[in-house]
Image (spheres, helix red, strand yellow):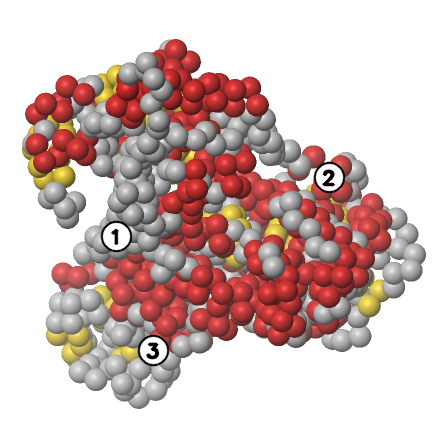
Amino acid sequence: MYKRYLYGDGPSPTQGPEESKPEKRQEQVGQSHEDIVRESVRKCWERAEVSCERVKELNVPTTQESGCNARNVSSWKTIRVFVSSTFTDFFNEREVLVKKVFPELREWCEERSLYLVECDLRWGVPKDSTTSDTISTCMEEIDRCHSENEGTPFFINLTGERYGWIPSKEEVPSEVRRQYDWINDTSITFMEVMHGAYRKRNPNAVFFFRNGDFCKDLPKEYQGRFTDLEPVKQEHLRVLKEKLRARFPDQVFPYSCQVEGVSEESGRQRVKLKGLEDFAEKAQDFLRKAIIHTYPDQKAVKNPDPEVQEFENHRLYMEKKSEFVVGREELLRVMMSYAKGDIMDGLQLSGGNEKSFVRDPTYWGLDKGDNPVLCLSGPVGYGKSTVMARLVQNALKSGILVIYHFVGCSADSRQTEKMYQRIVKAITGEKLDDMPPEEQDCMQFYKDKFRNSLPRLREEDRDVLVVIDAINELVDYNVYNHLSWLPPMLPRKIRCIVSTADTHFPTLHRLQEHPFYHMTMTPLTVDDARLIITQRLGRFNKTLASDEIDEVLSQECVHNPLWVWLITEELRMFGDFRTLSSKIKSVSESVSSLLSSIIKRLISDDETGSMEKVLCVIACSRGGVPINDLTNLLGDIEQKEALPALYWAKIRRHLKHYIRTVGTREYFTYSHSAIQKAVEDTLLTSRDDIKAYHKLLAEYYLTWSTDKYINMETVPYHYTQAGLKNRLVNFLRKSPDSRNMPDFVRAQYLQNLRCKNLADPVLPNTMSTVLCMACSIKKSAFAPQFYDNKSSCVVCGSHIFGSQIGKKLVLAHYCGFHSVGHSSRMGKCHVCKNVVGKDPDGTQKFGTVYGKLCNRCSFGNDAKKCCMILSD
């Protein structure tokens, strides 16, 4: 599918044939050519050894536990493995790594709450990649491995009989030369080894030296792909192996292989090697030992606790968001006073003048000493999440028990039921089991649990702060029962702070039904905006003249923190302020117009051709896309060929300031909801386009993804959004991935597919469903469970226990339209559609069984609704 440019083994695509030749050197009198070669290599290694002394320790970010809300568990960590080698001669070894070593190692890592990501940039390098861009991307990937793996990246080097292509001085960017202490007249592979392993004597680096004896069996036309004939490269290679053996005596492994023949399995002729089992075993063994040594606290857990994973998702998000807060000191001071229970001087109660039906005070049983809720609201992009994150950190440092939830920080964080279950369990300390089958409304079940615990909580003497960010982004934000879970008051020392966008009036209206403290995000001051611009540009060693900053600060949107952040990123990338000044004025009307122009620029500047697809896939995802799934989705799904790593590295470099990684499984999503909205408004304007992306996501998870939990969560959602009713029904009723889906979730999806016509038994032409004798004793055809049809709901397949806890069994009926072909004496089996007989008095005949509805599918008016499922 992809054209491959062998950047490790040949000239840059920007070079001509002559430019790729080694630089000619004037031979000194009395020296042989061999002496000159050795002297040249010796000088390179002198510079290399000097650079080892100069190298500075990388700053590795650390993760701190969050005060009294921290648990004695190890958080998920990312393991990045960088693969370094020349290209044409190591196709077979990389195939072994990608198809055998890494999949097995990934499963082993997941049992230890570790997430493995392999970085093999030599796989599928774009044909039009410039040398400068390729080198920069490659070195930056090693930097990521440094920063995320305690400063000791997991590094695999494969060395054979090739040294690799040596770029000229002009082809190495000056910034790269300075940043990585580049050594002239050496290959890119050599510099990967220096930066990833040699300079810091990396204990997590492993070197595999392939025995070259197999080369004598290679067909003549393939000899050049596996061996270097130039003397200078041969000497470089000899010294490199010698130095690595001396510096890493326990980390160098020789191995042998044999030529099996020439194969065209990969779409082009390649030499196929055999006997690589020893190589695979050694690679697997070394990486496991290195990972255990680096992360000794990551113990094997067969089934990681989902609650622990979700807690880590929120903690990591909180720590990331709280890094940079400017000009919010007074706001944080007042919020901390509320958290501590201080007298709220200068902050008056708002609301309480409207009658409440949803947040009914009678239901909650309020007490005079209870605390009102505090709400922080403000325009989109004003930094509410940043303030809430810093508040959590400040409260934890003060010794307050904080229970926090950031909507949007993980795939499940927007699900109201899961959020409420998590919070109620943390407040009450009770173990909340799954909802009993007799219950109809899981939200009501959790609300009742919380309400019943309030009298006990009023007697307890402990400060508890509940922080919920972005309640306007919960999935039920536009339904009637929105915020029904939030008590008007909280008992004694339990206090609650929520945040919402001031543009979402249903949320504000619900809050105003009862007295509450209301604080608003004020606009940035010009001085605060100046500080943000100066500090963010300073991180990249960039500055603007005072008159240039003044021009930015003169724009109308300067008081919006998101606009300031976005325009700073634009300034940083454009560099030339004069070129950008007209652009600033043209997009300064709003955040949305600026974001739209940024999206168009990202697509126009994209060299991979995948940028628009990336933006749309993330926008249509359900809370983000795991990085492995994203690279697969951008590749060839039919052939199961992922997007080449260098393509993805380029895309991520351009997007890194607009996306964030959430959750322990590295879900990629937008760093702000305004960016998500801008992508939808700019790129997803057609309903057909939206359906196409949801179909793409559903088909990928159903045919390629091996994560059954993610498949169960995402496939029904995407089929629903794509309008593919028939495929949704097939998944819910036949796919093994849906077997562990909770009954109430399956019922919810299928309820939306039921015929909307009334099927009340008192109406004429309304007929009951029947099952023939054969189908009645078969395994349920309506859900991948192990119950027979006669004891299962004909809609969702849930098991019907006896008389449904004292409730009379509800028979399922067809509406007048779907009753065609039925009569009082004859009917069609609901499963196989064969004609069966029945008695007019309702008694069963010939072993027929009447179809029934479970509690969920017969709740309320659903008992009188047609039970027929409407597919495509």
Report the quarter where the C terminus lies. Answer: bottom left
Q: Of helix, strand and loop, which one carries label 2?
A: helix
Judge left or right: residue 846 versus residue 740.
left
Residue ID at (32%, 14%): 30
Residue at the disc numbered 2: 396
Return the residue at label 1: 2
Q: CA distance from mark 1 to mark 3?
A: 47 Å
Mark 2 or mark 1, earlier in chain: 1
- Between circles 2 and 1, the one closer to the viewer is 1
Vertical position of residue 716 compared to residue 131: above or below: below
Q: Which residue is mark 3?
A: 755
Label 2: how many Cα within 10 Å (few below 14, some 14–19, many 20+): many
Q: Secondary structure at mark 3?
A: loop
Q: Earlier in the sequence, mark 3 or mark 2?
A: 2
Local packing at callout 3 (Cα closer than 10 Å; few below 14, some 14-19, many 20+) is some
Placement of the N terminus among the 4 image quadrants? bottom left
Q: Residue at x 39, y 11 (%)?
A: 246
| Distance between the alpha carbons at the discs numbered 3 and 2 | 52 Å
Question: Where does the image place residue 333, in percent across and percent down from the top left?
Answer: 84, 50
Whether residue 291 sits left or right of residue 832 in the image: it is right
